[in-house]
Image (tube, grey):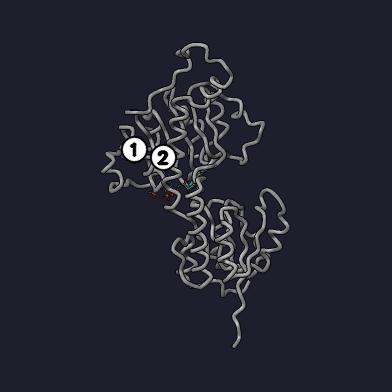
């Protein structure tokens, strides 16, 4: 009896744990490669040439990177955002793209709230103050923070993560919630007594703002100089979405003026360059794109990505398919290049 040849998958992601890899090796030929953004782009590109499937995250992938990956049937991204993939090209090639929604929602909302609290209560500045031996008596009022409890929380993008941030604000901190999304989300908003608000009034009225929109051509630089000028002095501005949703130059300018404070997990260029003016500012709290970075959540994301890839390579519709047109048009990889 003829044995079916195993398909080849490439894993360029460190969230896939050794026991998961062992299990994948029973079904597939597996190549582990380093993340090509940081090192050894060549071994990644070479492995892709014979790959049927790929597990990765945040790697820019389009025609330039995939032209030689002639057998590629599916990419399982270990992320919910998919702005780094050239969707049009993947769809044209009949390559399925999957993501990992839901499993990271609560951890990312926790990161958003951690940044809200740390920024409002100046946790990092006061930590430094304590470590540097400057705590000789009670702190001066110049170092006081602002309340979070009972404040007005404006959420830009009221999807899974935006709603999870809103739940924390409403149930945990007695906050009044304003939200902006492309359409009002009454079912989710009603229990939270959240009000739909156009972007400009949301920016002008909120005490604390949290950005949770995906990066798309429509949301790139959604918040720029004009929008920052609408903010009230003392506003806490938190971005846990994508750096490019915000015009970082305009953000730096308003932070330098001392008008607002910010908590940022994402940046226009990542890793954030050491020469960025943000690095030396005391009115900003910085984290290195760690929205979903907990052990439990990353494990869950890796498991979900593997499930998506297994199903896609078995020529079935994966649960978290992003480019659904590929499936609907029925032109899965059978296409010749
Ligand atoms: P989601 O459920 O799809 O929610 C996105 C929300 O944004 C939806 O409510 C959508 O509104 C809204 N939106 C889209 N375009 C908009 C626009 N132009 N103006 C206003 N609202 C707009 O996605 P999610 O799971 O919450 O994830 C959101 C994003 O968070 C991801 O795409 C990713 O980039 C980012 N993220 C970051 C981290 C991190 O590590 N920092 C971790 C996870 C996710 P409609 O539904 O009405 O169109």
331 vs 21, nearest the viewer: 21
Question: Which of the numbered marks, if any, corresponds to residue 15?
Answer: none
Which numbered mark, 1 or 2, is in the foreground of this view? 2
**Earlier residue among tags 1 and 2:** 2
Q: Is residue 92 visible?
A: no
Residue at x 41% of width, y 40% of height: 156
Q: Position of residue 226 (x, y in %)?
A: 48, 31
Few, some or many residues within 10 Å of mark 2 (<14, 14–19, 20+): many
Measured in 3D between alpha carbons, the distance from the residue under mark 1 to the one under mark 2, in whole angstroms, is 9 Å
Few, some or many residues within 10 Å of mark 1 (<14, 14–19, 20+): some
Q: Secondary structure at mark 2?
A: strand
Looking at the rendering, which quadrant does residue 130 occupy? top right
Q: Position of residue 334 (x, y in %)?
A: 56, 75
Residue at x 53% of width, y 28% of height: 284
Some atom of ligand 1 lies within 8 Å of the CB belonging to the residue at label 2 = yes
Looking at the rendering, which quadrant does residue 66 occupy? bottom right
155 vs 216, nearest the viewer: 155
Q: Is residue 206 above or below residue 75?
A: above
Looking at the rendering, which quadrant does residue 250 occupy? top right
Q: Secondary structure at mark 1?
A: loop
Some atom of ligand 1 lies within 8 Å of the CB belonging to the residue at label 1 = no
Q: Is residue 279 above or below residue 134?
A: below
Q: Position of residue 104 (x, y in %)?
A: 45, 49
Q: Which residue is mark 2?
A: 156
Quadrant of the snapshot with the N terminus? bottom right
Residue at x 51% of width, y 51% of height: 298
Q: Is residue 171 visible?
A: yes
Q: Which residue is mark 1?
A: 197
Q: Position of residue 200 (x, y in %)?
A: 40, 34
């Amino acid at each position: 009896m003829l044995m079916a040849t195993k398909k080849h998958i490439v894993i360029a992601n460190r969230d896939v744990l050794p026991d998961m890899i062992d299990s994948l090796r029973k079904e597939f030929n597996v190549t582990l490669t380093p993340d090509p953004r940081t090192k050894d782009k060549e071994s990644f590109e070479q492995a892709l040439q014979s790959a049927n499937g790929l597990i990765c995250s945040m790697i820019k992938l389009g025609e330039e990177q995939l032209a030689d990956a002639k057998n590629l049937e599916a990419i399982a991204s270990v992320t919910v955002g998919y702005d780094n993939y050239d969707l049009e090209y993947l769809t044209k090639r009949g390559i399925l793209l999957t993501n990992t929604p839901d499993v990271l929602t609560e951890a990312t909302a926790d990161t958003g709230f951690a940044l809200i609290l740390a920024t409002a209560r100046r946790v990092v500045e006061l930590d430094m103050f304590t470590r540097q031996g400057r705590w000789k008596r009670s702190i001066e009022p110049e170092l006081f923070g602002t309340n979070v409890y009972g404040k007005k929380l404006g959420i830009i993008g009221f999807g899974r993560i935006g709603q999870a941030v809103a739940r924390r604000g409403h149930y945990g901190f007695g906050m009044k919630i304003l939200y902006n999304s492309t359409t009002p989300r009454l079912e989710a908003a009603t229990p939270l007594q959240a009000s739909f608000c156009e972007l400009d009034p949301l920016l002008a009225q909120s005490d604390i703002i949290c950005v949770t929109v995906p990066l798309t051509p429509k949301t790139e630089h959604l918040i720029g100089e004009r929008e920052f000028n609408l903010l009230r002095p003392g506003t806490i501005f938190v971005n846990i979405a994508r750096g490019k949703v915000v015009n970082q130059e305009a953000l730096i300018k308003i932070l330098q003026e001392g008008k607002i404070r910010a908590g940022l997990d994402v940046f226009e260029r990542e890793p954030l360059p050491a020469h960025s003016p943000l690095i030396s500012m005391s009115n900003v709290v910085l984290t290195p794109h760690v929205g979903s970075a907990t052990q439990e959540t990353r494990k869950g994301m890796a498991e979900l990505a593997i499930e998506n890839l297994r199903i896609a390579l078995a020529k079935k519709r994966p649960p978290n398919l992003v480019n659904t047109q590929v499936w609907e048009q029925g032109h899965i990889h059978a296409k010749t290049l």
